[in-house]
Amino acid sequence: MKALVVGGGGREHAIAAALSRNPDTSIFSVMARPNPGISRIAKKVLLHKETDTQRIAAFAKECAIDYAVIGPEAPLEAGVVDALEAAGIPSVGPSRAAARLETDKAFCRELMHKNRIPGCPEYRVFHNTDDAVAFIENHDGDLVVKPIGLTGGKGVRIMGEQVDRHGAIEYVRSLNGIAVIEERLLGEEFTLQAFVDGTGLVPMPLVQDHKRAFEGDTGPNTGGMGSYTMPDHRMPFVAAADYTKALEIMQATITAMAQSGHPYKGILYGQFMNTAKGPKVIEYNARFGDPEAMNVLSLLSSDLGEIACGIADGTLCSKNVTFEKKATVCKYLVPEGYPDKPASGKPITIGDDKEALLYYANIEEKDDSLFTLTSRTLAFVGMGDTLEEAEQHAEQAASSVRGNVRYRRDIGTRKLLESRIAHMKGLR
Ligand code: AMP
Ligand code: GLY
């Protein structure tokens, strides 16, 4: 089978690596800039803008691609799945209309509200500055201000954490009042990703990501500095009832999408806040998470290609989806100064540690040397029977890298996990 992977980050390297574990699958790639990991696996690469949907569909036809897997959200928003399917190429990813679950935060909240889907925080959608400002001025309690469109996870302002009431008002003014404003949720975040075939879902192991740049969850928000999974595929601060509820919320969302005439297929990424009153949806993404894809795809023991075909033709079956019962810890190395002033163009060298999986992300390979760019550089995934073992593998590999890069040593440590558990206990 010929599989096309769209996108060139760490997530897409993990997708290509998982697909290529089947020796009968050959990988084709469209990416905006070369990812050395994907280039090594791929039979053919088109270096091209990932939102040029017509060019991507034409390339897929030229290469007689059997199915496509879309990594990032931008091509989905541009309608790459619509273009591929019009060219007769089955795809893992939602249509442009169905991708609004991620690309339009107002659409997402209104779908949940109209269909009485549990887990929706109190929210209001605003289209002008006066109304939005008046709402923030007169509201008791902390709020969260979100732009309606895509912002790479960096567009949210949280009162009581990043801004005060005055700062929230300034921010909503800068958005010309076009925003979703919602209650601030308190709790522990977790990620539930699922394979979705239009009507049903098959869940992947729970993951916890770390958005903040620095240890101890301090500093600015990033695309995600690293993430971990547990051997039982759950999180110790997510009770069985919370997990069931989160699955019900995702299933109800998929059912509502099908009823709306825009069935959802692809990967559905639910970002949840486990609150004192159970899980609430922070947002949906219409794709794998980055870094979360690297955790779950490293564990996947069944054939991703077969799953992809089940998603594309609506015959996905949970029997064909298995994950190893191991822990994973993913640590991203990022340029010094990331995300505000990343040191790009700096040489790095990687030690010869063989215990962790290496996924390349935003990195340049020139004359056999590696250089940082402006975004996340590369990631290591350690695996093991326990979290400790997985963390040690990731940590050893990460500490072997020399150059102007840094990473969070605390990700995947027992100490950080214990603080999450204690936080959840304190809330309940
Ligand atoms: P998003 O762009 O929606 O993923 O939001 C980025 C980050 O903002 C999330 O990972 C959360 O940590 C935080 N966040 C978003 N919405 C809320 C909310 N309603 N309450 C508390 N934190 C939130
Ligand atoms: N890890 C967050 C995201 O992929 O959006």
Image (tube, helix red, strand yellow):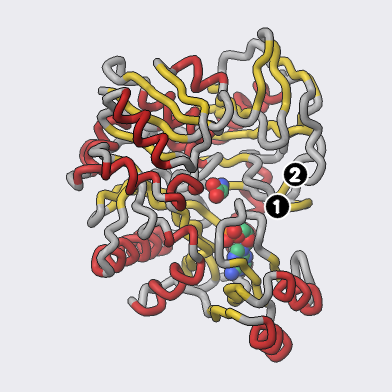
On screen, residue 18 versus residue 12, left or right, reads left
Which one is in front, 171 or 318? 171
Residue displayed at 25% across by 23% down? 1
Q: Is residue 74 above or below residue 102?
A: above
- The nearer-to-camera label among 1 and 2 is 2
> What's the amino acid at mark 2?
Pro
Q: Quadrant of residue 159?
A: bottom right
Residue count near mark 1 (Cα–Cα under 10 Å), binned few <14, some 14–19, many ≥20:
some
Instruction: State the SS at label 2.
Output: loop
In the rendered structure, the answer to whether residue 352 lies left or right of residue 58 reads right
Quadrant in the picture for the C terminus: bottom right
Q: Position of residue 150 (x, y in %)?
A: 56, 57
Q: Secondary structure at mark 1?
A: strand
Q: Give the residue type that dot 1 points to.
A: Asn
Is there any visible trace of residue 140 in the rendered image?
no
Mark 1 and mark 2: span between their CA atoms?
A: 8 Å
Q: How many numbered marks appear?
A: 2
Ligand 1 within 8 Å of the CB at mark 1: yes
Image location (x, y in percent) of residue 161: 75, 66
Per the image, the residue denoted by label 1 is 221
Residue 210 visible in the current orientation: yes
- Residue drawn at point x = 25 percent, y = 29 percent: 66
Which one is nearer the viewer's eye here, 166 or 351? 166
Q: Which residue is mark 2?
A: 339
Figure quadrant of residue 421: bottom right
Sequence-earlier tag: 1 or 2 = 1
x then y, percent, for residue 154: 66, 55
- Cβ–Cβ under 8 Å for marks 1 and 2: yes
